[in-house]
Each structure stands twice: as C-alpha cells, then as structure tokens.
Image: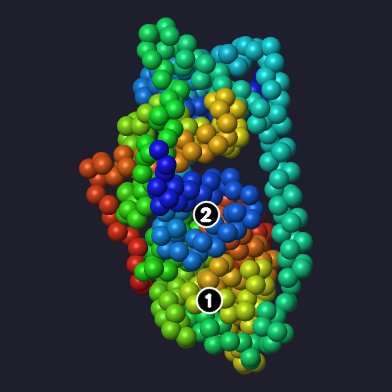
Amino acid sequence: MAADPETSDAHARWRRLNAFVDGELDPRAAARTARAIADDPADARDAAALGELKAALGDAFADHAPQVPPALRASQATMQPKRRAWRRVAAAAVILLMAGATVWLAPFGGSQDRSAPAWVTHAVERHAALSERPAQSPGARLAATPVALQGFAPFVPDLRSGKLTVGRIESFTGPDGAASLAVNYHGTRGCRVTLVAFADGAAGLSERLERLRLAEGAPSSDAPAAQGFVWRVGGVRYLLIASGMDAGRFGVIAETVHRASQLHRPIDDEGRTLMADARANSAPCQA
Amino acid sequence: MESLRRDLQTHAARLYGYAYALSKNPADAEDLVQDVFVKAMSAQRAPSDPDALRAWLFRILRNAFIDLCRRTRREAALDVGREAEADEAFEPPVGAEPPVITQLTVRFGLMKLSPPHREILALVDIAGFTYGEAAEILDVPTGTVMSRLSRARAALIDAIGESNILPMRRRGRTA
C-alpha cells in the first residue's frame, strides 16, 4: 500500500525530531532542525515534549539502585574516570580557544555602544530594570527544556548549575513591534544575568557568538560595567547581558548557552560542569 | 575488583530500569540485576573500555531475562513482527497538546507499552545508549532502532495522555 504523502511527511518529521533530541543527526541536519525549531512553534513544542520525555525516563529509576554484593572475584578496572576528566579538559580548551577568537568583536560593523541598534539599547535597559527588582516569590519556575510563548519559541536555558536561578521572566513587545522575551537570572553573590530574545529576524547577525561592547554608564555612575554577547539562531536574535560579572565566567556561560541554543536542547553535563567550575573559580559579582 | 564493583554500582540504577522495563515486575528486576552483578564479578575478564563494559552488562541482563522467561514459560516477546514496524501502525502526535510528563507518568505509561517498545525506550532513554549501540545489543539495523524508538515515544505520549492526570497549561507566562 502506498503511503499517504502527508502521513509520510509527518512520520519523517517525527523521526527527525526524535533523532535531534537524541543527538543522532549529523551536524548539518542538526543545524537545519535547530533552525526549524527556532522558527516553528509546533516543532519547538514537540521537541520540548520529547526532551521532557527523555529526561523523565532517564531519571525514572535513578532512585532504585540495587546494591552490588560483596566481592566475588577480581576483574579488570575500567578507565571511565580518566576518560571523563579528559573530556572536561578538552571541552574547556575548546571554549578558551573560541573565547580568544571572539574577544571584543563588534558585530555591527565595528560600531561602538553609541551607535548600537535600538533593540540592543532596549535589551540593556530592560536588563538594568529587571536586575534592580527582587526575584518573584516563590520564584519563576523553569522547565529544563525550551518553552513556547504565544507562537514564539525562544530557547530558555536552565543555569542553576552556575548558581543562577530565574528571578523574573517578562514577555514584551520589542522596539520594532516583535514578540520578545527577557529572562533575568539571579546569582547568590550579587550576579544578575539577562537573556533577551527577539522574534523578528536576523538583523544582520551571524549565528556565531560575538562579544558586544556595551556602555559602562556615566563616569560618575556607580553602576557596574555591563558585558554582552549576541548571536542568532534561525529567525531568533539573542542577547545575553551581565553586570559586574567576572569576564571569564561570563564567557563560559555565554559559550554554553550559545551552543545549547543552537541545538535547542537543555545544557548537557559538560556545559553544566564548566559553568559550575567557572563560578567556583571566579570572584563574586561587583553589584 | 573494587573498580569493577564501583562501575557496577554506577550502572545499577540504569540496569534496574532496563530490567523493570523488560519484566514489569520489581522483584524480577531486582533478581535480574543481582544476576548481572554475580555474572560480571565472576567472569574471567570484563571489558576494560567503559562503553564496551556497559554494553556487556546490558547484554548479560537481556540474556538473563530471556532465560528467566524460558524457565518460567513466559513469552519474552522482545522481537517485533514486520507488521508492527510499519508506519501505518502509529500516528505521530502532531498538533496535540503534550501530556503531563513526569517521572511518575512516564513510569506508568511505560508499563502500558509493548515489550519491544519498553525495551527500546529503556536502552536509549534509561540506559543512555546511542542508536548504534542499541542496534548492536538488539542485533537490528540502526534504522530499525530509529523508527522503533519514534513509534515507542509516540505510543508513550499516547499512554500518558490516556491516564487520568489532566494536562496543566504552563506556557504563556508573563511576569
């Protein structure tokens, strides 16, 4: 029996999303799917559901570990701890190399903060306003998987491994009328980080992570210096902003969030470990 | 020896999850995992590569389950017939509101699935095998793993949705 084309497309899409969530697509197919997820709320919703399903199954029996009996006979040791350590070192090296390549790039044709587009200025102002407000009580809850918001499906990462919890989530209309989302994270040592997503196209941005020069306030201002990174995934623009944070730590967070947003998947074990290490090795934020 | 014991303990929860998915019975699952521990610790040689060790342990468990079914004259039913592999056998949950997905609902949902679907979900999502590794354990092509898994997840979403737990809207949040 010949398959109905519509049904076949639905099956192919479903298989592709499954393979994407499992990390089984080749890089080009994964990038195409990530862009489709960024652009299509239906894909984002289904990918999020599959991610939740996978995560819930992965943890479903985590508390049921039978105890290994006392020794019978010796066998060989394994190399798992060494391998894990090597992977962490390799991942850190890659991030350092990437950070070195992107330091102080100006993504808007070499422009400085004074000529930054309106959406950047808008995002920085929103970061400042949100950072002054206390966290919502009992705290905005955030699923470990992407959220879909009124047809707009930006990637919202869980940064708790870096001791950053969601203080506030705010949806708003951007300066050019597009759906936008700002997620303000609170640290335990005075850090404030905001991820702002705009749904209105590319604005000339590449998909690479680029460091953004931001205004440091008037010379007399006591406000801590702000740092920013921008990038694009499909038709969604992202801007990550922090105030007073150690530049190395912020770079690790930005690299990790950028990578996860491209895949539209929760931050993986290595990313979480890197963010935790970066926090442990950094000074408190200058609030 | 201590190293192997540590490795076994590391894999214990996932082995139990796989055993539970196969047997649907906590007591059998516990026995199967203990069987794996004893066989692994009494083996002349265990694989030294971590990935090979993990695959070896799960193969031991699978064989132990098949032996258990033979002893108790139960049908293991781990093989999927050609009919069940056809696309017509399932509908992707396109356009549906996702059900409430928690550890509890997926465990209940998992138990409603067919043995092959429980097994593929256990291998990939609980044990964490890649498609290629799961294909080797099951002795099927990788494409079969991919299609079987996508059907199994669709079936699991259906099974969770059919439970008496009502969906809860958690989107469209504004501070």
Quadrant location of the N terminus of chain B?
Answer: top right
Could you tell me if residue B6 is visible in this image? Answer: no
Give the residue at x 50% y 23%.
A67
Mark 2 vs mark 1: give the one in front.
1
Residue annotated with mark 1: A201
- Between A272 and A25, the residue placed more toward the observer is A25
Could you tell me if residue A66 is visible in this image? Answer: yes
Q: Which of the 4 image quarters holds residue B24?
A: top left
In the image, residue A272 lies at what x, y percent? 59, 53
Residue annotated with mark 2: A266
Q: Which of the 4 image quarters holds residue A234?
A: bottom right
In the image, residue A89 lies at what x, y percent? 74, 49
- Between A220 and B114, the residue placed more toward the observer is B114
Instruction: Decide: few, some or many residues near mark 1? Use Cα within 10 Å; few <14, some 14-19, many ≥20.
Output: some
Q: Both on one chain, marks 2 and 1?
A: yes
Q: Which secondary structure, mark 2? A: loop
In the rendered structure, the answer to whether residue A261 lies left or right of residue B172 reads right
Q: Chain of mark 1?
A: A
In the image, residue A41 lies at what x, y percent? 42, 63
Amino acid type of the residue tagged 1 in the rendering: Gly
Amino acid type of the residue tagged 2 in the rendering: Pro
- Between A219 and A207, the residue placed more toward the observer is A207
Give the residue at x 67% y 19%.
B46
Quadrant location of the C terminus of chain B?
Answer: bottom left
In the image, residue A167 lies at what x, y percent? 44, 68
**Residue B94 versus residue A38 in the image, above or below:** above
**First along the sequence among labels 2 and 1:** 1
- Between A27 and A267, the residue placed more toward the observer is A27
**Residue A253 versus residue B18 in the image, above or below:** below
